[in-house]
Amino acid sequence: MLFSGNPDTLPKVYNAGDIVRFHRVKIQKFNDDIQGINTSGFSALVFDGTVGAPLIPRTSSKSYSFNSDDQKKVELLRDWAANNLKFPGSRVRLSDIQPVQFFDLICQLIGKAEMDQASYLLKVWDGTKCVSPTWKVCVEEEAIEGDRDFIRQLQNLTVDILVYDNHVETAKSIKIGSYIVIHSVHTKLHTVNSGNQPNGSYLEFYLHGGTSYGRGITVLPENNYDAQTLQKFLESVDKKDFQNLEDMSSCESADVFKTPLGQELLPFGVLERHQELSVTVLPAHRDWQVTPLTTVIQSKVPNKYRVRAQLQSFEPQNLYQSFKLHCTKCKSLQDVPDEDEVNIIFQGHEQNASPNPNVLNTSWYQSVVWETNNQKNTHIVLHFVKKNDIQQNPEDTLIMIEGGTFQDIFRLSRHFDSIIPVKCNQGELKLDLSGPFLIQGNRWHYGCSSCSKLRNPEALSSLCSDVSWSVSAIAKALGVEPLKHTFVMCFKLEDETGFLNAYLWNYSEQFFQIPASEIFVDDKLQEQLQSIMNALCPPRKQRSEYPWLECCIRSYNATNEGKQQVCYEIFDTIVTKRI
């Protein structure tokens, strides 16, 4: 196993059978087994293992030595491997692909398009044609990047591959015309039914998220032997031989759809799914079959499902009531104090805020006293915590504040990195968990009064040599059990078979793509949340016009007032940008 914070420094291995020369590898024993570890100055040269391939090393090193003896060694290893080793043929041509198969595909990219936040379309070919009909993804012509005439010309030789999650950014960055290896492509056979009789089937191609089994995309350099071999083969293909072939949707079905590119696409059952686009996407589990809600309700608990339904109603209707604070330790839920409640708490601090010489200017903080201009002539005391005995710039500074209104502290939070509201009690600074214990910009952090074991703020002096003021470090030093901001909502989902109530809770930030810790003091985020809910459940439309949601649902048993009941929760689901 080789580890590096920079993937460019790792060996450029493209295929099983490649030959690698390591530089500065330390050999040692671990649990009586010999192992090699990379050390300072580590580098590697990688050569194609094919007999007769050019001896062009792949390396990230700026300088290296490679003499005639090294060349002979590589050639000897190639010959020996060819005669003694058999590598599993994971690379497959399109003409040899079978249903339900995982394989590596070396191909050329001729078109690409963004589908949604979590998926991306790649149009590729390798000069051969699949024996089985293949899936053509429904996408607008204007959305496809690439030479449209060339794409039309190759429409019977290309396959559409949907890539997901962590591979999306890589797919976006690949230039049209590049030669690539897509590792661990998954083919799935989809059967289309017409009435009670099978109407046909076609292959779907996916590159799932994650890196298991080597999943990923490698862009081959121009001087790569495999890339050059594929290029020569593609140049020899007579494209006219394939232009008049019938594609998969020429199955004798009247329910056929043509894209602007002239590609025949999915028969009716699948087409309907694409025409009524979902307003949510699934970052994972896209290979799960859609399950009717009645089946979900009738199935054993616990379980997980992918469903397609409409949001008929939701609670609470007043969205501010959905903002909650959750303690992961005692599992309690509580409301987030609103601005008026927090202001009352701070006013209590303000009334007690008077300059106390016992808590001013210690070795680890410097104090400043401000007198307000209001009628009460109250004081605000600021304690600037030092780092390495040095006072920091405002944007890097932690301050403790006695007194001040909600607006005072809100204004200060725009200038200082971190703010801890405190009060002076019997000559000592103390925390008060009735309000936020830490404020960092728009993030107001609260602590659980039941689970926290508060320490004196002097414990912060142990952090004065740290690089930054992290929430976890401050909470640990002060003995605070942080509460997690979350949205808690109940969705009534309905499809053609029935309905169920599903909670949106643990995965709510992922669902809305809105930080719950910021929304309470950010009007724009509140407007964004209201806009999303109006789009999911339009207040002035008929229910038949409501959009469709694809969701992952899990069922579980819960106890409520001593009674056991089955509950459902939405997970791994994201609202799309287009709403």
Image (tube, helix red, strand yellow):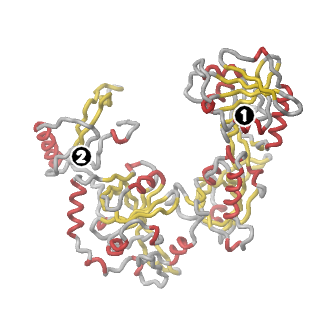
Badge 1 element: loop
In this picture, residue 562 sits left or right of residue 466 = right
Residue at position x 62%, y 54% in the image: 511
Give amino acid for label 2.
Answer: Asp
Q: State the image coordinates of residue 87 (x, y, percent, origin top left).
A: 25, 50
Residue named by callout 1: 447
- In the displayed structure, 245 sits above or below 126; it is below
Tell me the quarter of the picture where residue 13 sits.
top left
Residue at position x 64%, y 68% in the image: 547
In this picture, residue 105 sits left or right of residue 438 = left
Give amino acid for label 1.
Answer: Gly
- In the displayed structure, 309 sits above or below 520; it is below
Residue 18: assigned label: 2
In this picture, residue 83 sits left or right of residue 93 = left
Q: Is residue 98 visible?
A: no
* Earlier residue among tags 2 and 1: 2
Q: State the image coordinates of residue 522 (x, y, percent, origin top left).
A: 70, 48
Residue at position x 71%, y 27% in the image: 400
